[in-house]
Image: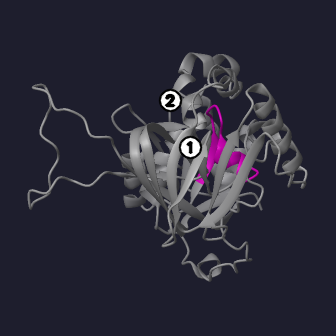
Amino acid sequence: MRAPRTTVAPSPAHDAAPPAPEGPAAFVINPVKVADVDALESYARLTAHELGLPEPLIYRTTVEDPGVGQAQAAMAAGASVVVVAGGDGTVRAVAEALAGSIVPMALIPSGTGNLLARNLDIPVDNLQQQVRTALSGRDMAMDLGWLRTVPPPREPDDADEAPDVDLTGTPAPPREHVFLVMAGLGFDAAMVAGADDELKRRVGWVAYFIVGVRHLHARRTRLALRLGTGDWHQQRVRTLLFANCGRLPAGIVLLPDAEIDDGYLDVAAIDTRGGLIGWASLLGRVMLQGLGWRSRNAYNPSRIEFWRAREIAVRLDEPHAVQVDGDLVGDAIALKVRVQPDGLRVRVRR
């Protein structure tokens, strides 16, 4: 079941992609996440003027539209780059709109995790560098992950609305959710569900670890896993992850072989035994593998198995919450995950 870790040559799309439009930059700003929206807008205009660029377009997200519509409007206006100022959810929304286009996305990380920015080595605490990179950096292609859930069946009641249907009367298929860094179920989704906005505002990404302590003794997840067109394999795990890149806050490298542009998703099945001893062992494993060392001890009370695939299917024994880049997308009894190679152009430091 372990996929070979072969080196994948860069796609010609990395070098042969047509240039983006030559219009102004467009800033899509989440006013809830950005501490000083007026200051950001002023600095964006000032930097564009210093670089001899047109005055940027400014869009703000709303509760009803968290970024998809604004990014689409920016592309329609001929934007040369769409700059996202917000958290991971805003980044996902804009990436969904830009997927498959020639318009690059740039980042002004303003959320709790800022996972994509960390994996692209974009500073998370220097606005000047962020804006200059957004307006004058270089573009690269990265892969996108897409996850489709199958929700558990439920008994209808009188208050239920009719399901969405297409023109043939067939119920609309479940929606695919884009992710740029990592999706998963089990322990990690439980942490996401328990970390409320107030806790994240007070302690930042540490909120996820605080919540995680409450779930250390939760039941393990039983599931069947299939990579590509291979056989189904039974697994019993604490968490199952699908990763486009592997770096987390605090320098933690959870999936050391995950690369953002290799055309694959990395899959990790993580399990522990023996209560707190198993979790302590897991923490040690993660820290050591970040330094390039991996334990092969079969009697270790923790286990991390890695695979690589372009498509993954999962069947669960019972419904579990699922998260994509730190956003819950509901409970699922099954799911399908796929990679879109070179699905998004992003702007990084020169």
Q: Earlier in the sequence, mark 2 or mark 1?
A: 2
Label drawn at residue 325:
1
Q: Residue at x 60, y 36 (%)?
A: 188
Magenta-tinted stretch: 106-121
Q: Which residue is mark 2?
A: 31
Identity of the amino acid at label 2? Pro
Q: Amino acid at mark 1?
A: Asp
Q: Which is more toward the observer, 177 or 240?
A: 240
Kindly check if marks 2 and 1 are in contact, taking CB atoms under 8 A apart as contact: no
Q: Position of residue 286 (x, y in %)?
A: 81, 44
> Is residue 198 at least partly visible in the picture?
yes
**Which residue is at the front of the view, 71 or 207?**
207
Specify the quadrant that holds the N terminus: bottom right
Residue occupying image coordinates x 69% and y 58%:
306
Q: Nearer the viewer, residue 127 or 109?
A: 109
Location of residue 267 in the rendering, given as x and y in whole percent from the top left corner: 62, 57
| Left or right of 84, for residue 118 | right
Q: Report how far apart the C-alphas of labels 2 and 1 lie in the structure.
A: 20 Å
- Residue under the image location 61 percent in, 35 percent down: 40
110 is within the stretch colored magenta: yes
Query: At which x and y percent is residue 313?
Result: 46, 59
Residue at the image position 75 percent from the left and 35 percent from the top: 125
Residue 48: which disc? none
Q: Position of residue 253 (x, y in %)?
A: 78, 47
